[in-house]
Image: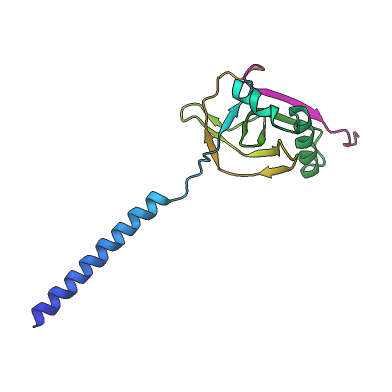
Amino acid sequence: MEKTEKNSLQSLKSSLNYIFFIMMIILVALRCSNEIKKTAYIYNSEEYKEKIKAFDVSFDNAKVIASRLYFEKHPNAEAYHFSFDLILGDYYIFCDTNRLYNSKTTQYYLKGIWVNGKTGEALQKDTNAYVNVLLDIPFTKLNSNFGTIKNKTTKRT
């Protein structure tokens, strides 16, 4: 009888180890990825040109909205230097001129100011999220929009 109980306990232990192992595999498979799966519209592409037709906020207005939020967060800044490469979903994504793009993995990190093209709402996002897109390098005025907006409220000394 003692051997049967011992075998039963070993069998239960084995089963629990197996269940634990399967649960770990499932958790690893379902772990949260930082990749965002929304559609990205690359600047100056045909898809981009079609997408902005549905927006109430023009690109030029979105730049101004983004700069207002930037200067609100950085009141002593003299200028807002931005680069713009894509729309994600309904958002213009403005990052600083040191964009985070890895051309080998095609990961474009989405840290920056997001302006909703339909509502004009602006959000500052400090995130590790990324979208996979293939951007043409080097960045030129044909495949990227970059510039500087000066802060009119900064006092010069």
Left or right position of 155 against 137: right
Q: As displayed, is residue 135 above or below residue 100?
A: above
Which of 122 and 120 lies nearest the eye of the viewer? 120
- Coordinates of residue 28 in the picture (x, y in percent): 38, 51
Please check the rendered image and state whether residue 133 is part of the magenta-colored stretch, yes or no.
no
What colour scheme has been applied to the protein in the rendered image?
rainbow
Q: In this view, does 127 lie above or below 84?
A: below
Q: Could you tell me how many numbered marks the image carries?
A: 0
Among the 4 quarters of the image, the one containing residue 17: bottom left
* Outermost residue toward the front in this view: 54
x and y percentages locating residue 70 in the rendered image: 76, 39
The C terminus appears in which quarter of the rendering? top right
149 is within the stretch colored magenta: yes
Q: Which residue is drawn at 23% across and 66% down?
A: 15
Q: Seen from this angle, which residue lies furthest bottom?
A: 1
User: Where does the image place residue 106, in percent across and percent down from the top left?
Assistant: 49, 29
Residue at left offset 64%, top offset 16%: 142
| Residue 87 in picture, x, y percent from top left | 63, 32
Q: In this view, does 134 lie to the left or right of 154?
A: left
Q: In which quarter of the image is residue 152?
A: top right
Which residues, given as a range, are shown in magenta? 142-152
Instruction: Quarter of the image for the N terminus: give it.
Output: bottom left
> Residue at horizontal 62%, vertical 39%?
111
Q: In the drawing, does residue 69 fall left or right of residue 38?
A: right
Residue 117 position (above or below residue 125): above
